[in-house]
Image (spheres, helix red, strand yellow):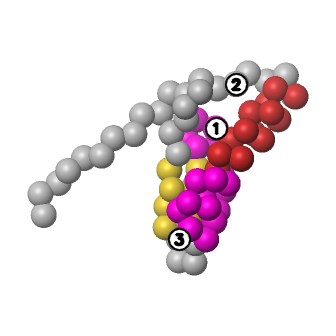
Amino acid sequence: MRYAVVIEKAPANYAAYVPDLPGCIATGATVAETESLIREAIEFHLEGLKADGLPIPPPSSQVEYVDIPA
């Protein structure tokens, strides 16, 4: 599966979340660390849903960039 991940710069680090998996978040010192940690968080989140007998939400979010003239 392929989930959309949003990574945002915070004052002292980076934070990531997954729109299709509410509550699935991670923070890291760098973008690379945050990407690694959110991957682990997604796997852990999905394992928890399976263990609780809950459905796995299908990936449905779409990410696009929109160019705006400066």
Q: Nearer the viewer, residue 16 or 2?
A: 2
Residue at the disc numbered 1? 21
Depicted 61 relative to depicted 37: above or below: above
The question of residue 20 being in magenta is answered with: yes
Picture coordinates of residue 53, whole percent (x, y)? 85, 22
Sequence-first tag of 2 and 3? 3
Report crowding for label 3: few under 14, some 14 to 19, many 20 or more residues within 10 A (C-alpha).
Answer: few
Sequence-first tag of 2 and 1? 1
User: Is residue 58 found left or right of 65 in the rendered image?
Assistant: right
Residue type at tag 3: Ala
Q: Give yes or no for contact between labels 1 and 3 (Cβ–Cβ under 8 Å).
A: no
Residue 56, labelled with which disc?
A: 2
Depicted 17 relative to depicted 47: above or below: below
Which element type, helix, strand or loop, lies under badge 1?
A: loop
The question of residue 41 being in magenta is answered with: no
Picture coordinates of residue 39, whole percent (x, y)? 65, 45
Residue drawn at x 55%, y 35% is 3
Quarter of the N terminus within the rendering? top right
Residue type at tag 2: Ile
Which element type, helix, strand or loop, lies under badge 3?
A: loop
Report crowding for label 1: few under 14, some 14 to 19, many 20 or more residues within 10 A (C-alpha).
Answer: some
Distance from Cα at disc 2 to Cα at disc 3: 29 Å
Quarter of the C terminus within the rendering? bottom left
Residue drawn at x 53%, y 45% is 5
Which residues are the magenta region? Answer: 18-37
Q: What number of labels is visible?
A: 3
Residue type at tag 1: Leu
Residue at the disc numbered 3? 10
